[in-house]
């Protein structure tokens, strides 16, 4: 009986912690992405830019939910229940595919289009 209660307590703790991380956007405070005039900036601790992916090095950006790309892309997602974008780079040393979850994917995609980056939007079904 005690082991069942321990398992249930552990599951509740995981669910509460997961909800808190998601609701409070805690991971977005550790690392995130934003757009600049040159490209997509990867930032840490909400301010420090540690890498800028220039628009000229982006082959295309695909809107989606992640899918099998978790296996072949560098995963830079920090909002787990949000839609993600797959960035395919033209060239790269470490990873040519990167998954990101910007705070507002729609505005992010619109700004990429305005910057001349090829964007492939996901097909939506009318429910």
Image: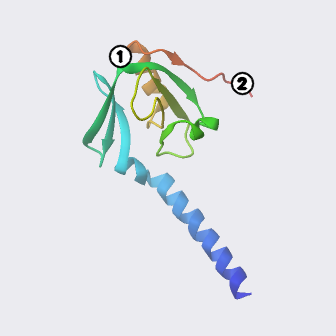
Q: Nearer the viewer, residue 110 or 65?
A: 65
Residue ID at (39%, 14%):
114
Side of 45 where 105 appears, left or right: right
Q: Are marks 2 and 1 in contact (CB under 8 Å)?
A: no
Q: Quadrant of residue 42?
A: top left
Q: What residue sits right under mark 2 in the picture? A: 125
Q: CA distance from mark 2 to mark 1?
A: 32 Å
Residue ID at (53%, 35%):
84
- The mark closer to the camera, 2 or 1, is 1
Residue ID at (37%, 15%):
115
Disc 2, SS: loop
Side of 19 where 113 appears, left or right: left
Question: In the rendered image, which quarter contains the C terminus?
Answer: top right
59, above or below 81, in the image = above
Q: What residue sits right under mark 1 in the picture? A: 56
Q: Nearer the viewer, residue 6 or 53?
A: 53
């Amino acid at each position: 009986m005690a082991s069942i209660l321990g398992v249930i307590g552990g599951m509740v703790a995981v669910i509460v912690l997961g909800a808190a991380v998601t609701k409070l956007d805690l991971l977005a405070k550790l690392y995130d992405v934003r757009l600049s005039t040159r490209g997509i900036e990867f930032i840490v601790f909400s301010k420090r830019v540690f890498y800028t992916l220039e628009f000229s090095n982006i082959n295309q950006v695909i809107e989606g939910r992640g899918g099998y790309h978790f296996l072949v892309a560098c995963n830079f997602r920090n909002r787990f229940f949000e839609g993600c974008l797959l960035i395919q780079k033209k060239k790269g040393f470490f990873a040519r595919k990167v998954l990101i979850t910007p705070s507002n994917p729609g505005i992010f995609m619109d700004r990429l289009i305005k910057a001349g980056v090829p964007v492939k939007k996901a097909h939506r079904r009318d429910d």
